Image: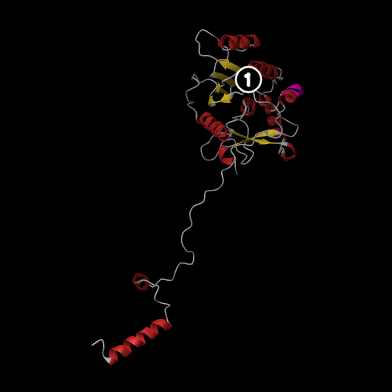
C-alpha cells in the first residue's frame, strides 16, 4: 500500500509543503489549543535588591579627634562633665536645656552614683578599668543610656558592644530593655549604626546621644511632627547636617540645635566636632531616608 504510486505522490507533496512553510512547526499542541500570542515581556527577571542605604551620616569630614582609648577615658569623662556643668541654666522652662553627665557604672548597692571628678577618678582607680566596663550617659529627666565598652589594652581604642536607652526613672540593669517604645526604638537605631559602622568611636556616639536633649520636644525636620504617624514615636534618629549644606528653617530649630552642640568654644575646639553651621537634625526613623 505504501509503495503504491498514489501514496508516494502524496508523501512527496507533503514533504515539499513542509519544506516550504515551517512557521507553525515550533508551537506545541498545547500552545495551539490555547491559541494565545507569546508574551511581549518575556521571562520574569530575577529580583535585584537595591543598594544598602547608609544608616547614618557622622561627622566624618569635621571630626579630627583620635578614637578614645581606655587610658584616656577618665580624663574624657571629667572634661565632658566639666563642660556640661559650665552650661548656663535658663529660668525659662521653654528654653531649659537639660545637662548631660557621664559616669563609669558599677553594680554595687553600697556605692552611690558617681558624680564629682574625684569620685570618677576614685572609681576608675578602684575598678582598674577592667574590660568590659559600662559607661553610663544621662540626660536629666530625659533618658539614661548604658554602653558596655571592651578593650584588650589600655592604649587601644575602646569598642562599643551595645547601647541601651532607658527612661530617666526606670530602675533597670544595663542588660535589660526599656518598657517604653521610644527608648526601644532609640536603642535599635543606634544598634543599626554600630552594626554598619563597627569602628565608630565613643566620642561620636556620645555626641549623637547628647543631641537628644529635646527628645520629646523637637520636631522632625522632614515631616515637622513631634510624633510619627505610624507608631507615635518622637524623632529619636539624628542626622548630621554639616557645613554649607546646613540650613535652619526657623529660630526655634536654631535654638534647639545650639543646645545640642558644644557648650563652649573651648570645648568645641577640643572635641573638634562642630562648626557654626553644623548641627544634628532630629528625625523619625521612618523619615531618615525620605
Give the image location of residue 229, x and y in percent. 54, 40
27 lies left or right of 278: left
- Residue placed farthest to the front in the image? 3
Res. 264 image quadrant: top right
Main SS of residues in magenta: helix
Q: Name the element at disc 1.
A: loop
Q: Please give the range of residues in magenta.
A: 263-267
163 lies left or right of 83: left
Give the image location of residue 170, x and y in percent. 50, 21
For the image, the number of numbered tags is 1
Give the image location of residue 162, x and y in percent. 53, 27
Depth check: give the residue in front, 125 or 286.
125
Res. 101 image quadrant: top right
Position of residue 56 relative to residue 26, above or below, is above
> Quick one: quadrant of the N terminus?
bottom left
- In the picture of the structure, the residue carrying the numbered disc 1 is 155
30 lies left or right of 146: left
Position of residue 142 relative to residue 9, above or below, is above
Q: Is residue 24 magenta?
A: no
Amino acid at each position: 500500500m505504501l509503495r503504491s504510486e498514489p501514496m508516494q505522490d502524496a508523501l512527496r507533496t507533503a514533504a515539499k509543503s513542509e519544506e516550504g512553510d515551517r512557521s507553525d512547526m515550533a508551537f506545541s499542541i498545547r500552545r495551539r489549543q490555547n491559541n494565545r500570542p507569546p508574551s511581549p515581556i518575556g521571562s520574569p527577571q530575577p529580583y535585584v535588591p537595591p543598594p544598602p542605604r547608609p544608616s547614618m551620616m557622622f561627622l566624618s569630614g569635621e571630626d579630627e579627634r583620635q578614637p578614645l582609648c581606655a587610658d584616656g577615658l577618665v580624663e574624657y569623662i571629667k572634661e565632658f562633665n566639666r563642660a556640661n556643668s559650665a552650661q548656663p541654666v535658663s529660668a525659662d522652662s521653654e528654653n531649659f536645656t537639660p545637662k548631660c553627665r557621664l559616669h563609669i557604672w558599677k553594680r554595687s548597692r553600697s556605692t552611690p552614683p558617681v558624680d564629682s571628678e574625684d569620685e570618677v577618678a576614685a572609681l576608675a582607680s578602684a575598678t582598674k578599668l577592667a574590660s568590659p566596663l559600662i559607661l553610663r550617659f544621662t540626660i536629666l529627666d530625659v533618658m539614661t543610656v548604658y554602653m558596655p565598652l571592651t578593650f584588650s589594652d589600655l592604649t587601644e581604642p575602646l569598642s562599643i558592644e551595645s547601647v541601651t536607652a532607658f527612661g530617666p526613672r526606670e530602675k533597670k540593669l544595663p542588660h535589660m530593655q526599656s518598657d517604653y517604645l521610644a527608648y526601644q526604638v532609640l536603642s535599635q537605631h543606634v544598634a543599626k549604626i554600630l552594626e554598619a559602622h563597627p569602628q565608630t568611636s565613643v566620642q561620636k556616639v556620645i555626641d549623637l546621644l547628647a543631641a537628644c536633649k529635646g527628645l520629646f520636644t523637637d520636631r522632625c525636620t522632614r515631616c515637622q511632627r513631634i510624633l510619627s504617624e505610624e507608631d507615635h514615636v518622637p524623632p529619636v534618629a539624628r542626622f548630621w547636617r554639616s557645613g554649607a549644606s546646613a540650613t535652619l528653617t526657623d529660630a526655634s530649630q536654631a535654638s534647639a540645635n545650639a543646645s545640642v552642640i558644644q557648650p563652649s568654644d573651648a570645648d568645641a575646639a577640643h572635641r573638634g566636632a562642630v562648626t557654626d553651621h553644623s548641627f544634628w537634625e532630629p528625625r523619625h526613623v521612618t523619615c531618615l531616608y525620605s
